[in-house]
Amino acid sequence: MQLAAATTMVSSLVRHERWQHGPTLTSGVAAFLAEHDLSPSSQRVYTSALRELKDGLGADTSLGTLDEPHAAEQLAVWFRKRYQHAAPATRVRHVAILRSVCAFWRKQAWIATDPTAGLERPKVPLDRTRALTRERIAILCRRNDIALRERAFWRLLYETAARASEILSLDIEDLDLPNKRARVRSKGGATEWVFWQTGTALLLPRLLAGRSSGPVFLAARLPARAVPSVDRCPLTGRARLSYRRAAELFSKACPDLTLHQLRHSALTHAAEDGTNTPILLARSRHASVRSLERYARPGPEAVARHVAEHDPARRRR
């Protein structure tokens, strides 16, 4: 009993010595990530963004230095230099991540001020042309020069209106093929269903080719380095297809498009077809109507069709 008490006291003294100057960026980031139940895709985004912060300011830097007089200005200078060529939406995301982690550190009383006060949230211009036409989607899905894996992936993205990271995270065990649906870990961490149609239903069995477990979408070659077991097919040994590689392949086949436009197009087309807001929210899994708004805006072709169909001259025929 006395030995256990002595051991506990020594451990406490060691912790006190280690933390007497406050946690470092490394330990502060680790505590933040451990505290928040992030989805796998969000975990990757947050980890990458906070790694950039540690690399920029120094992993062993004490969090206490963020309370110094010029800390906010120095952070703003680093942020502008690091993300000056990034898209506005990317900068918005990284500002939000930094503000979230700093709010957590203030809650823990590790810092007293807000070092992100000097970071400006850039305005993201609304691009009303992001949704593809139905004709272009149809042409994309019929292309014979595209491998089966990409055709299945792109069609699944469009028919489910899911995020690319969610679909790439799918394992075969998540699929309910008879009911044309799958379980995904959503952006907020919840497990939810996504649904597809006949086009995807015809392609998935061909893609799986008898496999019964492991990632749905696999890389073309065996991995050159160690891969976690959950990201490796037990039958072929190939690793899960990465988002970066999937985006590269899509960009190569469609230089002017992004994977996200398939999700955007699906929601826009559903809105054009008169799908009500509750169903759109359920399908997109957005937290609010405001988040959905930019997707559910009818495209110019739909507006033109509506105007033509309601032309008084047309009604007199």
Image (cartoon, rainbow, N blue to C red):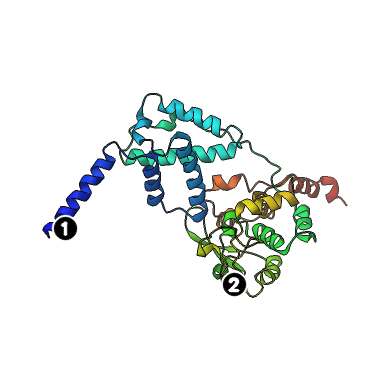
Residue located beneath label 2 in the image:
235
Quarter of the image for residue 280 reads bottom right
Quarter of the image for residue 111 reads top left
Quarter of the image for residue 88 reads top right
Which amino acid type is marked by label 2? Leu
For the point 54% across and 30% down, the residue is 80
Q: Residues within 10 Å of mark 2 (few under 14, many from 20)?
A: few
User: Percent from the top left, x then y, of residue 245?
Assistant: 64, 53
For the point 70% across and 70% down, the residue is 202
Q: Residues within 10 Å of mark 1 (few under 14, many from 20)?
A: few
Judging depth in this view, the residue of 181 and 306 nearest the camera is 181
Q: Earlier in the sequence, mark 1 or mark 2?
A: 1
For the point 52% across and 47% down, the residue is 45
Q: Which mark is residue 4?
A: 1
User: Percent from the top left, x then y, of residue 313?
Assistant: 85, 46
Dot 2: element: loop
